[in-house]
Amino acid sequence: MSYSKIEAQFLDVDIKIKGSKLETTIYTKPTDRHMYVDEKSNHPRTTKKSIPYGLAIRAKRICSTEEEYKKNKSRIIEHMKNRGYNRKKITNIVSKVDNRERNELLQYSRENKQGLQETRVPFVTKFNKFIPNIQKIVHSRMQILHNSMRLKKIFPEAPITAYKR
């Protein structure tokens, strides 16, 4: 954390007093090298697409003005280009956030895209292209989980989703 009478940096937020208002934008340490997943890595395409999208959502949430959001959006595109990503593709992905309302993005939601309450249990593991299809294995063994009333409540019959290549 760093601060003065008119400005403070805390975690990844730069807060400034402008007149009678507080304005926020993204703060990055001078040593940050923006070493996001390289485009040539073996990570699934969906992971590589979600990184710039997630960065743009973060920028829209943190930046209190549209001008600051646009500056940070340009930086995101440049950082991803430096990691081997195609500028046009990244621009298209990041631009999907442009029409989203900041207030909406600041609200916590456990609803999925269909507006239904999210019920899935996340399964997080390190990525390895040699890991077997965990989604298929869990689906084939779901009945074992459902033999227990307690586990059936935790793991309902909702489909399990996994990243696809």
Image: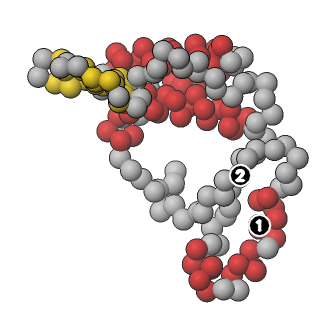
Residue 25 higher or lower than 147, as above or below? above
Residue labelled with disc 2? 125
Query: Which label belongs to residue 113?
Result: none
Left or right position of 40 against 116: right
Disc 1: which residue: 138
Amino acid type of the residue that numbered disc 1 sits on in the rendered structure: Val
Q: Quadrant of the C terminus?
A: top right
* Figure quadrant of residue 91: top right
Residue 59 as seen in the image, left or right of residue 84 = left
Residue at horizontal 63 percent and vertical 23 percent from the top: 35
The residue lying at 62 percent from left, 72 percent from top is 155
Q: Which of marks 1 and 2 precedes in the sequence?
A: 2
- Taking the image as shown, residue 56 lies to the left or right of residue 80, namely left
Q: Element type at marker 2?
A: loop
Q: Position of residue 114 (x, y in %)?
A: 51, 55
Residue 135, percent from left and from top: 77, 59
Residue 58 point in image, percent of width and height: 45, 32
Q: Nearer the viewer, mark 2 or mark 1?
A: 2
